[in-house]
Amino acid sequence: FYKMEKEICSTYCMFVIYITQISTFLVLSFTMTSLNPATPAIRAFVNTTFNERYNSSIGETTLMVLVTSIQSMLLLGSLAGAMSAHLAVTNFSRRGSMVFTHITNIISCILMGPVAVYFKTYESLIAGRFLCGFARGIGFTAAPLLISETTVHRYLGKHLSISGLVVPLGYALGNGIGHPLVLGGENTWPFLVCVPILFSMVYLLSAHWLPQTPGWLIKNGFRRKIIKTSKKANMKAEFNNLSKEIELDTTLTEASFWEMVKIPKYRQQLICTVLVMGSLQTTGISAVALYSNRIFHTAGVQGNNATYASIGMHLITFCVTLFFAQILRKIGTKKLLIFGLAIGACSLVFLVIFIALQGHSAVLPYCSVTALIIYTTAVMGGPGIAFVALPSQLTTQTTRPTALYASAATYWLTGTIVSFVFPFSSAAFGEYAFLPFVGVTVLQIMFACQKVPSTRRKSVIEIQDRFNRRSSKCRGSKDSGIVVRSLMREDSNPIEP
C-alpha cells in the first residue's frame, strides 16, 4: 500500500494537497471560533461606539441583535461565497480561485480590524465578517474541488480527510488566541481578527509553485502544459488516472444543475451530496462552535473556565479526529458518517437531560461537559470528515463541480439559519433548543443507511453502477444507455509525454 501510494501520489502532489487544505481550512475554522471568547470585548466595542454616535445607551435587545449579526454574518457571507463559487472557479481556474479566496480574506481582516477601530464603526466589522465569510464560501468549495482534481480516486477520501483534522485544530486556536488574556481583550481584539492574514500569506507565497490542477488542464485541453507539469512534478500517474476518470463519462463536458436534476443517475448524486454535506450543519455544530462559551455557562461552567473548556474540547476533538482519519480506509466514509451522527444524537439527548437536572446534583455539570465533548468529537470525527470526502467520492469529474456548488450553498444556508436562530431559541427554550438537532440527525441517519452508497474499496465504476441500478427504470432512455456504456469503457488514450 505504501509503495503504491508513493508511486501514484508524488511529493509535489502531496505538497499541493497539504498547503491548500491547511491554509484554507485553518482560516475557515479559526474565524468561526475566534470571536467566541472575545464576545465581551466585541459587546463593549459595539456599546461604546453606539453611545458615542447617538449619545444614548444601547438597549440589551439591540445589542444582542448586533453581536449576533456580527457572528452569523460570517455564515451568511459563506452562503454568498458558495453561490458565487462557480463563477470564481470558472473565471479564475481552480488555483486562481484559491488565490482570490485568500486575497479577499486579507481585505476582510483589514475591514474588521484597522478600519473598524479607526473609523469607530461596527458596520465595518459586520461588513468584514460578511466578506470573510464570502472568502470562506468560495474556498470551502474550491479547495475540495482542487484536491479531487489533483489526486486519484483511490486516495481521495484519505487526502480530503486532512481538512477534518485541520478544522478542530483551528477551532482550538481560535478559542485560545481569542482568550481575553491573549488577543481577545478590549484593546487587543483588532489584532485577533487580523491573525488569519498569516494563514493566507502562507498560501499566497506558495502559489507561484502550485500548478493548475491536472483535471482542469485535461478538461481544457492544455496538452503541452500537461506534459510539462507531469515531467516537472513526476505526476504522470495522476494525470493518466484522472484521464481515465474523465473518460468514464463522456456524455457531458460538465453537468449543469438542470442536467443533474433531469438525469436520474446525476439526480441521485446531487441529492446524496447535498444531504451528506448538510448533515454536519444539521447536527448543530455551528451553534456549538460559535457559542460554546455560552453553552458551557449553561452547563454550569463558571467565568473564563468556559473558554478553557472550549479549548480542551477542540483539542480532544483533534486527537479523536486524527484517530478516525487513520481508520478511514478500514471502515469507509459511509460508516464513519453514520457512526458519528448516531453518537452525536445520543450525546445531545444526554446533554439536555443533564442540564435540565443539574440543580439536583453537583456531579451533573461535569456530566454535561462530558456529553458536550463527546458530541463534538463524534460530529467532527464522523460527519466532519465525511462531509468533505464523501461528496467527492460519490461524484465524477463531470458532475463534481456542480454537485459541490449546490451542496456548499445548502451547507452554508443551513449554517446561517442555525447560527442566527440558536441564540434566540436557547434564550427562549433553554437546553431544549438542542432537541430539533436530534430529530433532524435521526432522519439523516435513516437516509444515509438507505440511500448513500458505500465507497469503501470501490472504484468510480462500481460507485456509479450503484446509482445506475437505482435509476434502472430510466435505463432504457438514450442518455442513460450512453452513460452506462461509457462507464464500462476503459481508457484507451492515456497521456504520454
Image: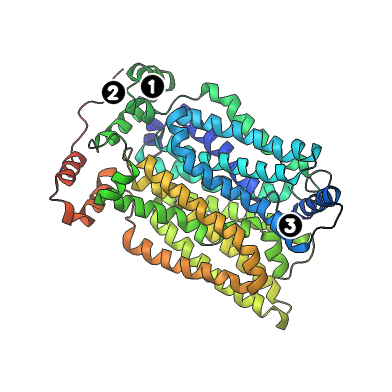
The disc placed on residue 307 is: 3
Please tell me which residue lies in front, 418 or 224: 418
Q: Earlier in the sequence, mark 2 or mark 1?
A: 1
Name, please, the residue furthest toward the left: 476
Can I make out residue 490 in this image? yes
- Tally of marks: 3
Can I make out residue 169 in this image? no
Q: Which label lies toward us, 1 or 3? A: 3
Label 2 SS: loop
Q: Residues within 10 Å of mark 1 (few under 14, many from 20)?
A: many
Write down the residue under mark 1: 230
Q: Quadrant of the N terminus?
A: top left
The disc placed on residue 495 is: 2
Q: CA distance from mark 1 to mark 3?
A: 48 Å
Name, please, the residue furthest toward the front: 54
Q: Amino acid at mark 2?
A: Ile
